[in-house]
Amino acid sequence: MARTPSALASLSAGLRELYEAPYRRTMARARRDEDDLFTLVVLAEALGVPNPASYYTVEMLPLVADRVHEWHTRMGLDRSPLEHVSCC
């Protein structure tokens, strides 16, 4: 019986899904935690925390400005801790 490439690709995709499925939620949580830490590092100077890398992180403020509302609600804050950002 000859196996076609599509059958092998289908088998490979099925095995990959079987292996990755239990870890999908854990990996998503780890990525979200990393994104939250990145947001905190970028916004540290605006939050009043001395940031030795503020020269480099100021360029990334526009990237995290869109996600401030999601970030502060995940951190358990009712309102944005930033005075110049009013998202709620």
Image (spheres, rainbow, N blue to C red):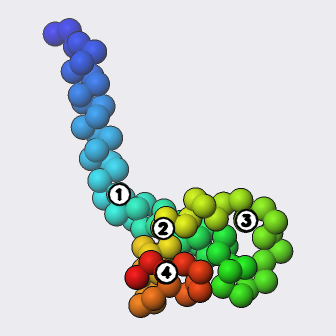
Which label's residue is closer to the chain start, 1 or 4? 1
Q: Which residue is mark 1?
A: 24
Q: Nearer the viewer, mark 4 or mark 2?
A: 4
The reply to whether dot 1 and dot 2 touch (C-beta < 8 Å) is no
Which mark is in front, 1 or 2? 2
Which amino acid type corresponds to the residue marked 1 in the rendered image?
Arg
Which secondary structure, mark 4? loop
Do the CB atoms of the residues marked 1 and 3 lie less than 8 Å apart? no
Q: Nearer the viewer, mark 1 or mark 4?
A: 4
Amino acid at pointer 3: Val
**CA–CA distance between discs 1 and 4?**
33 Å
What is the distance, in whole Å, between disc 3 and disc 4 at their CAs? 19 Å
**Which badge, 1 or 3, is on the more N-terminal residue?**
1
Instruction: Answer with left or right where residue 44 lies relative to residue 66.
Output: right
Residue linked to disc 3? 58
Residue at x-position 59% and y-position 81%: 84
Q: Residue at x 42, y 68 (%)?
A: 29
Q: Residue beneath label 4, please?
A: 86
**Residue type, mark 2 in image:** Arg
50 displayed left or right of 11: right
Q: Quadrant of residue 81?
A: bottom right
Tell me residue 35's x, y (percent): 53, 66
Tell me the distance, in whole angstroms, between the alpha carbons under discs 3 and 2: 15 Å
Earlier in the chain: of badge 1 and badge 2, it is: 1
- Left or right for 10, reference 30: left
Q: Nearer the viewer, mark 3 or mark 4?
A: 4
- Which sits earlier in the primary sequence, circle 3 or circle 4? 3
Which residue is labeled 2 in the image?
Answer: 67
Element carrying mark 1: helix
